[in-house]
Image (spheres, rainbow, N blue to C red):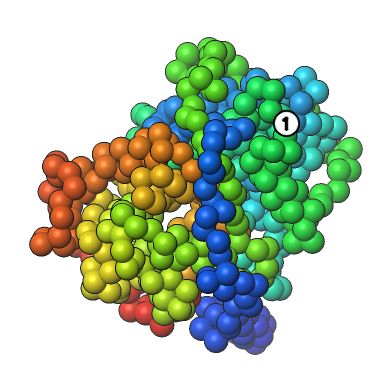
Amino acid sequence: MLLELLIWPIILILIYIMYAFVTTAVIYAFLKPSESFAVDEIDTAAFYGEEDGPDKALIIENRPFSLNARINLIENARLSIKIAYFAITDGIVSDVFYGQILEAANRGVVVQIIFDGMGQNLIGEKDSVYWALVKHPFINLRFYEKNQVVTPWRWNNIMHDKILIVDDKYAMTGGRNLEDRFHLSDYEGESVEDRDVLIIRKENRVLEESSISQFISYFNELWSHPYSRRLNRYVPAKLSEVAHRKQGEAFSNLNELKQSARYGFDQTIDWEAMARPTRKITLVSNPIQRLKRDPQILKILQALFQTAKESIFAQSPFIVPGKEMQKYFDFGSDKAAVYYLTNSSASSPNLFALSGQNKYMTFLSQKADQLYEYHGQGSIHGKSYVIDSRLSLIGSFNLDPRSAFLSTENMVIIDSVPLSQDLTAHIMILMQESVPFLKDGPHLTQNLKQAQIIPKSKKRRLTAAYWLLYFFEDIL
């Protein structure tokens, strides 16, 4: 009798699993992206300027300065805060973030937050700070692609951006999620070395001529898009007390962190004085589409690689030159020397992406002048490029099929020789913690690390991932 009762639920579950597998993995091998422009239509000269522009830029490289920078920007906000973020997880950084956002809203700052529907820590929690955010009159919260049970093919189309805009004067983008492992110098687990860039609109320069206006336009596009769900601001009476209590807890957690004196509260930072001058700044992004989207950032990278004349430094946490990607991006350059930096099998925590990278190491070695594999502490997560010691590219875009075709992504292209020198120096420091893959290729730094031994358990899991996903590289 019990078996008869269970047989149909089991059958339905199996049907759903098959349905989800086909629509989240198999279908992508047959889909083709729509295209809005070709690579040869891109005018790379448009990314260069002739004189100092209205903005300055500063690379945010190390922990805990990455957290301190966000703390300083939010606590000094006076008018508006706009946030578009892929991931936030429970921990100190989450406590700082929610406490500061509620604190800013209490002093009249208008806050707009858009989280990816799958990456944040608010859904499914009845006893959550979610209610404190929704109830506050100065906070507007939305989710990108939420509630996808019936349409599992949307699981792959995440909002991968990590953008913070404050008072229409500051804009930050990069690779860091709002997680302790990205920001805390004393994090006890596997830390992550990442990178952001802060754009500062100079005093007395109007918004319309600043690249900050490009960030605002892109944020507004994400915010107003039909894929971003508007939330009902009504809070049921039984949850109003929860909202009040969670706001009190958020302030209590924030005050405790302030009193610990371990984090960068109440600091005076002259961001404009610290930042580098720039000639021109351009924000580029992928289109907001479902299934396979036009790989616009990838095509811009191809145009820049084609026109580079001297050198290209490229850093990505994983590099997966899938067959579809190779149709749009060559991974090499006719004239410029190309130096890649990525995670090694020992350092990378992402076995799925790593399995795709290992599949193409021979291909990459034929395209690059040198390929560095990181063997330092933790893993690297920055996504950056330096073109001819002049253009710097920093953002959320990984050099893999997922970022190229599936996710919303952004990169900021900065014409600044001083900033490119800073970025090159940061990449070279990580290269010192890496091992050259090409023994006969050029060695740019004195390498301080030997290859780490990969645990047998990780080798087994990596082998399993390699064969499990061998035919599904389109979703890596």
99 to the left or right of 336 = right
Residue 174 seen in the figure: no
Residue 358: give x, y in percent of width and height.
28, 69
Q: Dot 1 lies on which element? A: loop
* Quarter of the image where the N terminus is located: bottom right
* Quarter of the image where the C terminus is located: bottom left
* Residue 96, quarter of picture: top right
* Front position in the image: 241 or 56: 56
182 to the left or right of 451 = right
200 to the left or right of 207 = left
Residue 222: give x, y in percent of width and height.
72, 53
Query: Residue, x 47% and y 69% (percent of image)?
Result: 401
Task: Give the farthest residue toward the left.
Answer: 440
Residue 233: give x, y in percent of width and height.
86, 43
Residue 300: give x, y in percent of width and height.
51, 62
Q: How many marks?
A: 1
Task: Give the farthest residue toward the front.
Answer: 50
Query: Residue, x 36% and y 63% (percent of image)?
Result: 319
Query: Residue, x 58% and y 48% (percent of image)?
Result: 282
Q: Residues within 10 Å of mark 1 (few under 14, many from 20)?
A: few
Q: Which residue is mark 1?
A: 206
- Depicted 168 relative to depicted 349: above or below: above
* Front position in the image: 258 or 217: 217
* Residue 353, quarter of picture: bottom left
**Mark 1 is on which residue type?**
Val
Query: Residue, x 65% and y 22% (percent of image)?
Result: 203
Residue 309 seen in the figure: yes
379 to the left or right of 437 = right
- Depicted 432 relative to depicted 474: above or below: above
